[in-house]
Image (cartoon, helix red, strand yellow):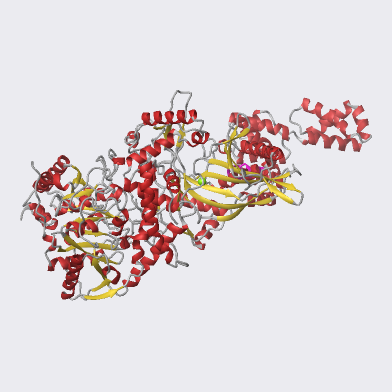
Amino acid sequence: MTNTAYETIIGLEVHVQLQTNTKLFCRCSTSFGAEPNTQTCPVCIGMPGSLPVMNRQAYALGLKTAVALNCQIPEFTKWDRKQYFYPDLPKGYQISQFDLPMSEHGWLEISDPKGAFETKKIGITRAHLEDDAGKSMHDEAAGRSDSRIDLNRTGTPLLEIVSDPDLRSADEARAYLSELKLLLTYLGVSDCNMQEGSLRVDANINLHIAQGERTAATPIVEVKNMNSFRAVERALRFEANRQFESWQANPVELGSPGGHKTTRGWDDQMQITRIQREKEESSDYRYFPDPDLLPVTATEADVASVRGALGELPAALRVTLAKKYGIDAYDADVLVNQGRPLVAYFEELAAACDDGRRASNWVQQDVLRLLNEMDATIDQFPVTAAALGELLKFIAAGDIDNTRAKDVLQEMIDAQSSAAEAMAKLGIEKVDASDLESLCRELLAANPAVVADLKEGKMKAVGALIGQAKKQNPNVNPAQIKSICIELVKQL
Amino acid sequence: MSLIDSPATELLQLLKSAEVTAVEVTQAYLDQIARYDGRVKSFLSVGSERALEQAATIDQRRGRGEPLGELAGLPVAVKDVLCTDGWVTSCGSKMLADFVPPYDATVIARLKAADAILIGKTNMDEFAMGGSTENSAFFPTTNPWDVSCTPGGSSGGAAACVAASMAPLSIGSDTGGSIRQPAGFCGVTGLKPTYGRVSRYGLIAFASSLDQVGPLASTAEDAALLLRTIAGHDPLDSTSAPVDQPDYLANIDQPLDGLRLGLVREHFGPGLDDEVGAAVGQAIKEFESRGARVQEISLPHSKYAIATYYVIAPCEASSNLARYDGVHYGYRTDEAAMLADLAEERKQLAAAGDEAGLANLDSPLMRLYRLSRSEGFGPEVKRRIMLGAYALSAGYKDAYYVKALKVRRLIRNDYDAAFRDVDLIVGPTTPTVAFGLGEMVDDPLAMYLQDLYTVSANLAGIAGISVPCGMTSTGLPVGLQLQAPPFQEERLLRAAHMFQQATDWHTKRPTLAAETP
Amino acid sequence: MSLSKADVEKVASLARLKLTDEELSTMTRQLDQVIQYVQQLEELDTSGVQPMAHTADLANVFADDLLRASLPRDAALANAPKRDDECYLVPPVLGD
Ligand SMILES: [Mg+2]
Ligand SMILES: [Zn+2]
């Protein structure tokens, strides 16, 4: 989808909650959904005298992610206080990173198998560790005039991942988010649950509009409150159009009077963005190094050992799967995008049936469909890869056709049985070769018109015979009926 | 010698040998407090009942032959800057007048584990900001040597209560001289340990990179005794140093042979009171007569120390004190009155058609913050918050904050160079002795300049001690400051002890006039 | 450089303080005095000097990711100036 009128410039800021047992600077639980204010201590309440101590695992997960995002890891990093007043920020500052973040200058490659855009590398400006704020709840409906503050989430470790403004469309933004989420899931650093706030996205967007020789840039808008990838996509589409229309009505350029950056919130109900009230002095955070925390250093050897322990990540895995199992790039992409556990299932299945393509087809067409119907994940799928492999081997041996095999798989699920047991239950048995031949002879004898057609080379005519054969014996293999009949006609 | 005039080390022997009970010792100090603290006002709260209860328990345990902590039965007064579980910890501020911490500072936990008896919480300048204890939101403490004078600050209560024999041991905190200066003014021994030596966990922060907790006592030996209990690595404080703890008492009797003392040229210039200079000169002669070699050294950047300090400390303070917003704990303005005022302001602005005024009007939350903080903090705290917020704000940070951090390194470099030639640096603790109450309240800068000799140690993170070394003609104590390289508290204490073996300034006590009962 | 009342007012708002007119005048005079004094640092050449935020030469201080008991809710909320059974209460926070 190209638009010659303007180019859309998008950068994304993603906050990911790291999967630790405890908070970034204290040892309170990070688990979601507890009763309000039951997971706090003097440190995360910001009580006088309390001091932060950094969670080793949070730093390790942050570093792992940064390395996987191809970031440069500086030898020295420190933590700074970002100061602003808000009731869900009990210390009066967030502990974040300012001028010396733990990682910078990385990239993430995105592609679209459907070809909507070219494969490209999106720059990662930086990824840094910081602590989360709590939750402010305002419930006018209940007749309360006060906002209620829950500090359970306060201090949860976040990794803020900032992209360069390299994204050129809502499609690309969505692809970036999907690929990022996939990577984070493969790394096991976050559950990326958007509903629970484990992954939050803010977008910076503006337009570059050709003005004869030069390009005019519209004021940058930061879009917030997008609660799903679909919302991100829609908000960005909406915002690009809105900015273009606004430009046409009143061409204000970035940096000119009235052209400062603004913040807009996505209204999912109305499917529009709305201007948000600016936080006072939001630009003067008075960052300075947190005197309660010490710097962290990382040697090249540290980084190398993190890199060595990453395992195969999605981009590489796609190539590996296609090569190793002889499947299309598209299929490899679909499999990899389903996550590491599904890939493991696929690989086991491919090994069990010794046929990567068949395994790939069955996983994509049947396993995924069934998982979808069951609303389950692959770990919950009742048929093991070994058991399904047995069934696929029967298909390969010509003992059963694909269509019947689907019934068998359903039976395996319903009765929790093996492939052989399910086939027996359904009365499927291999038809003896001589029985098959005599059946075909009978059919040809009874259908002279079909024989005539076949002699004239109208091979489609054999279909009528297959139908009759199945009626007489549901276990016959249609492909075998077809080839035997054609062979017999030739001999006539 | 009465109980309350005995050094803590001697009391401890008496307790161990069961010549006195913890209840007797505790009661003796409580009696002294009851008799004299009405004038000295060193305590914000005295925990008589719980102290006596704890003392009785210790006596029982001792009677049963149970093992006891190393300070068992010794009363310790604690500056109200350290969080004490279940005991109001106000930090000398209206903001925290009702704050009851749900946890113990590490230093408090260690004192409890050592079976020390927490006798009371001592008065201080609000949030440890000040040098006279006049910035306490509750009342000023007076100097036991002359109640018309200040005891110094911010650990004024901590020093005064030791000087007035109301506690044998006391805990203070020192960000720019807040242990050493009041120790000097009150004629007691006060040690600021190396940054990282004592845990800051539970110490209500003023300026985190400068704050240290330390002991105040009658003698260097007693200070060593208390330091041994409170010092040591703490995993709850990231800045706590993972270094070995020497037994500060074990070798304190051994004189330091061939001690090399450095005399800071810049500390004997204009501004130094003649009598203070004379007493310090006499003290240095005393060291020389015991074999010390004295040489002049230079700390060329020391004249910038106050300027450096009064950028860094307020910057950190402005951030540390952002948490006091009337939401999660602490003082909150009268909300109903605040909302009514806002409504009235809005009405007037609307009537006047003042659109800009309406747009700029505080939201209720904003006004809640501003009023809670303005009413909860005293003027000196507000000044420092403002100073820090200004020095960190956009456009000024490099000129003030970053610049100060660079000068701070130069100051540290000066010390590192000096300590290649000398073992300890010696000089006056303060330019003058205790000044009169109210004398400097309206001149913050003059008050700041009082910290001339003490702030450098905090900026550099090194250790320093103040010991009494003389008296002025008006009967006020003079303090001698010794400074040591990082983690050389043992050397510092041995030198101080050596001095106290040779002199008796530390044994002098003021004559107190009791208040009418 | 000297400090104006407008500067001080701006900083007061940044620091969430509300000064009376009298306080504003006094504060402006006193802060300006300190700022003037502090400006003596400018005479020092500090090019090439690394800023020193910590005196301790320490790095890489971590705690293990092991749960410890949180405060009981009542203890956590005990000091709150305004609360209900579960939460801290503040005047309505609009937006977000
Ligand atoms: Mg952030
Ligand atoms: Zn916590």
Q: Position of residue A270 (x, y in %)?
A: 62, 29
Res. B71 in view: no
Residue C91 placement, left or right of A354: left
Q: Position of residue A285 (x, y in %)?
A: 48, 48
Q: Which residues are magenta?
A: A334-343
Magenta residues, dominant SS class: helix
Q: Residue furthest front?
A: B352
Q: In the rendered view, would you say C47 is above or below B173?
A: below
The picture quadrant where one finds residue B251 is: bottom left
Q: Which is more toward the observer, B328 or A456?
A: B328
The residue at 52%/38% (across/down) is A197
Res. A65 in view: yes
Q: Which is more toward the observer, A341 or C9?
A: C9
The picture quadrant where one finds residue A90 is: top left
Is residue A337 a member of the stretch shown in magenta? yes
Residue A461 placement, left or right of A15: right
Q: Which is more toward the observer, A308 or B114?
A: B114
Q: Position of residue A133 (x, y in %)?
A: 46, 41
Number of marks in picture: 0
Q: Which is more toward the observer, B156 or A266?
A: B156
The picture quadrant where one finds residue A443 is: top right
Q: Position of residue B502 (x, y in %)?
A: 13, 69
Residue C11 placement, left or right of A195: left
Residue A268 placement, left or right of B14: right
Viewport quadrant of the N terminus of chain C: bottom left
The residue at 42%/67% (across/down) is C44
Q: In the rendered view, would you say B415 is above or below A411?
A: below
